[in-house]
Image (cartoon, coloured by chain):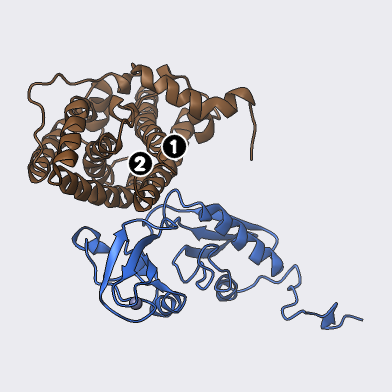
Chain colours: A blue, B brown
Amino acid sequence: MVTAQRHGEQIDRPPPPAAARPAIDQVWSWLEEVPDPEIPVVSVVDLGIVRAVDWEGDDLVVTVTPTYSGCPATAVISLDIAESIRRHGVEKVRIRSQLSPAWTTDWIGAAAREKLKAYGIAPPEGGARCVGDLKNPVVECPRCGSMATEQVSRFGSTPCKASWRCRDCLEPFDYFKSF
Amino acid sequence: MTTATKTDAALFEFALRMGDNAVVLAQRVGAWCGHAPAIEEDIAFANVALDLIGQTRMWLGLAGEIEGKGRDADQLAFLRDARAYRNALLVEQPNVDFAHTLMRQFLFDAWHHPMLVALKSSADARVADIAEKAEKEARYHLERSEDLIIRLGDGTEESRQRMQAALDALYPFAGELCAADALDADLAARKIAPDLGALGERYLAYLKSTLADATLTAPVGAAVRKGGKQGLHSEHLGYILADMQFLQRAYPGATW
Ligand SMILES: [Zn+2]
């Protein structure tokens, strides 16, 4: 007899029978649970990395786009996506990489921006189209809310971040750069 | 059929030029990792190198695909000799000091960004896609380079002298980036790549105005140093490749 509880492990989503083909919306909801490997409070869907989910014959094809062309997390993200889908019972999954349209922080939604802030990372300010005009964006300190902040380096601990500091609470913080 | 073959051969060479510029410069600036004068600049150059390595993978991946002989980006990067490299001489010039490193980066970024903007309209969709991705990164690099060139050029007496010395040494290499040869003309005629003559005029005008802001003076009448795009390199490239390719040469086929 199959029980819902085995070795204390909760089995909340039994894999679908082989013949069943999960709806596309269902797959998106799985991917919303796949965390970004470097900023685990946001998902790969939150960051706009997943561009499309489609059935092509019997294959489930997930189209992803890299954030930065050399970002070392890109390969891990593809593996995590494929693993998550297989765990939900879909065996034939392919990850397709797409360069155009190029990834932009404009695809990061309001809820994800709040999650970044709560995690201590200042979310991107303004639209990415302004990169060239936005040499000194006004960035709110994610720790104390002060606007008296300054850039320390245009780059940071990962390709998507810049290093900032707060002149009020004096703490350094990461800014998810507008791109 | 002949036309298609000719286009492919030219496009293969072009993709090598773009990819080799990126990989050689990445290797150069990556050497600062752990050694830069300030940790923020250390992190900045490590990130620039990372972007350039990502771009290398795209360009050399495309080159391998066009060539159709089964060579991937890694094989093209790690198993070609200096004579088969197609980067401009500028990017293989030594780091010397931080001023030389920044000036080399500035002279490269100031060309790289408008070049990629132009390539976004390439008649070849694969080239246009790579350019669309890389252009945003190159723009970010250029913003940093421009800022630092002006701050250090128009800075202390020592920083100005060092930046001027770097400009004197490196300016003769800038011209090669916009010096069109028959291959460039062929690709421009096919709308795959831009007219380098027109790009070069804008490049020189931008350098002139930014260097003026930095209170630096470009040397007048210096002969353009070129040949890298055709595979004729300075002695420096051999040392870069000996370092970069050591593992694959010593242990063929080794993987992580
Ligand atoms: Zn603060």
In the displayed structure, does residue B224 sit left or right of residue B65?
left
Mark 2 lies on a secondary structure that is helix
Residue A76, quarter of picture: bottom right
Q: Amino acid at mark 1?
A: Leu
Q: Please give the name of the residue rendered at 31% of the width and 52% of the height, measured from the top-left corner.
A: B136
Q: Please give the name of the residue rendered at 21% of the width and 26% of the height, measured from the top-left corner.
A: B169
Residue A145 lies, with reference to residue B206, above or below; the image says below
Mark 1 lies on a secondary structure that is helix
Are discs 2 and 1 less than 8 Å apart at CB? yes
Sequence-first tag of 2 and 1: 1
Q: Please give the name of the residue rendered at 52% of the width and 27% of the height, measured from the top-left corner.
A: B245
Q: Position of residue B2 (x, y in %)?
A: 37, 21
Q: Quadrant of ligand 1?
A: bottom left
- Count of marks overlaid on the render: 2
Q: Position of residue A121 (x, y in %)?
A: 41, 71
Residue B186 in view: yes
Q: Chain of mark 1?
A: B
Residue placed under numbered mark 2 in the picture = B127
Q: Nearer the viewer, residue A150 or B56?
A: A150
Q: Residues within 10 Å of mark 1 (few under 14, many from 20)?
A: many
Residue placed under numbered mark 1 in the picture = B62
Q: Position of residue B35 (x, y in %)?
A: 41, 41
What whole-number distance in Å separates the C-alpha atoms at marks 2 and 1? 8 Å
Q: Amino acid at mark 2?
A: Val
Q: Quadrant of the N terminus of chain B?
A: top left
On whether disc 2 and disc 1 are found on a single subunit, the reply is: yes
